[in-house]
Amino acid sequence: MLPLSQFSKKELEPIRMIVFDVDGVLVPRGTKIKQVGNTTTLETKVIHEKQIEQIKKIYEAGFLINISSGRGLYMLQEMFRGILPFVSLTYENGSATWYKGKIYQHVNSFEYLKDVFPKLKKVLENNKNVKGFEPKEFIITIHCAEQIKEIEEIVAKEKGLTTIWNGEAYDVQIKGDQTKAVGLRHVMEIFKLKKDNVMAIGDNYNDAELLAESGMPISADKNRVSGKFYVPLEGEFLPADKLMQKILELSPG
């Protein structure tokens, strides 16, 4: 991997779309969630004004912008309301994509998840390490203080399902069908792009497949995921900020 400082105009030439992960890339890492009975409280981080202006400039320079996240659509729309005219949103680990008010559903997970959800709720209802279930349409996300063996055991018994621990939550989803990589393949079809036309930046283990699916993978944390280039983590700027600075520096106009 090379540092982002060595990224050149030549590498940027074929790129038509830039795909951003959210947590740790466009906004700081970490989700605050509290669940009491049937009441769930989630803290929503909102994209900073500086990144809004950068994304507008990237869009004006002729690039398509996709935001790929495990979060639900409602939360992403709240977080990125200031840039919705300029971006597409691929949400819940590649399950669907929102673009200019239209939703492209990439997977139907209802039959897979309808039986496991009540099992998880029942087993976890009195577990103090469970912070809460994040509202989702296509996947199940359980925020926890630490890894919980019971979740892994329940999901392991369910045909066709898998679960991923990302350090703060479990995502329960269809094995092979609900990944950011599959979501990106659908996005490339929507916009008629080839792999070489796509740059993707991510910072966590669940971004590895997304980066591998792109022609120009950028790691926002070289200790967790690899890419052709990496963004150094030190300093006050978020990885997306540094990447957009570089793209705008190399773009004409």
Image (cartoon, grey):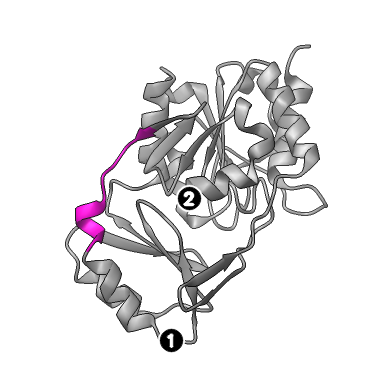
Q: Whole-percent x and y of residue 30?
A: 63, 63
Helix, strand or loop at mark 1: loop
Q: Whole-percent x and y of residue 49?
A: 79, 40
Number of numbered discs on residues: 2
Mark 1 neighbour density, 10 Å: few (under 14) some (14–19) many (20 or more): few
> Which quadrant of the rendered structure holds the C terminus?
top right
Q: Is 10 drawn above or below residue 207 in the view shown?
A: above
Mark 2–mark 1 Cα distance, whole angstroms, equals 24 Å
Magenta-span inclusion, residue 111: yes
- Name the residue at the front extreme: 38
Magenta-span inclusion, residue 81: no
Q: Which mark is residue 81?
A: none
Give the residue displayed 37% in from the left and 23% down from the top.
Answer: 189
Q: Is 220 drawn above or below residue 54 in the view shown?
A: below
Q: In this view of the protein, can residue 157 be seen by the observer?
A: yes
- Name the residue at the right extreme: 236
- The three-letter code of the residue at mark 1 reads Asn
Q: Whole-percent x and y of residue 202?
A: 56, 46
Give the residue displayed 82% in from the left and 52% down from the top.
Answer: 235
Q: Which residue is mark 1?
A: 127
Instruction: Specify whether 251 is left or right of 163.
Output: right
Task: Quadrant for residue 10, please give it.
Answer: top right
Give the residue displayed 41% in from the left and 88% down from the top.
Answer: 126
- Name the residue at the top extreme: 253
Give the residue displayed 47% in from the left and 51% down from the top.
Answer: 70
> Which quadrant of the rendered structure holds the N terminus?
top right
- The three-letter code of the residue at mark 2 reads Gly
Helix, strand or loop at mark 2: loop
Whether pointer 2 and pointer 1 mark residues with C-beta atoms closer than 8 Å, the reply is: no
Which portion, as a residue range, is magenta? 104-114
Q: Nearer the viewer, residue 77 or 37?
A: 37
Q: Which residue is mark 2?
A: 72
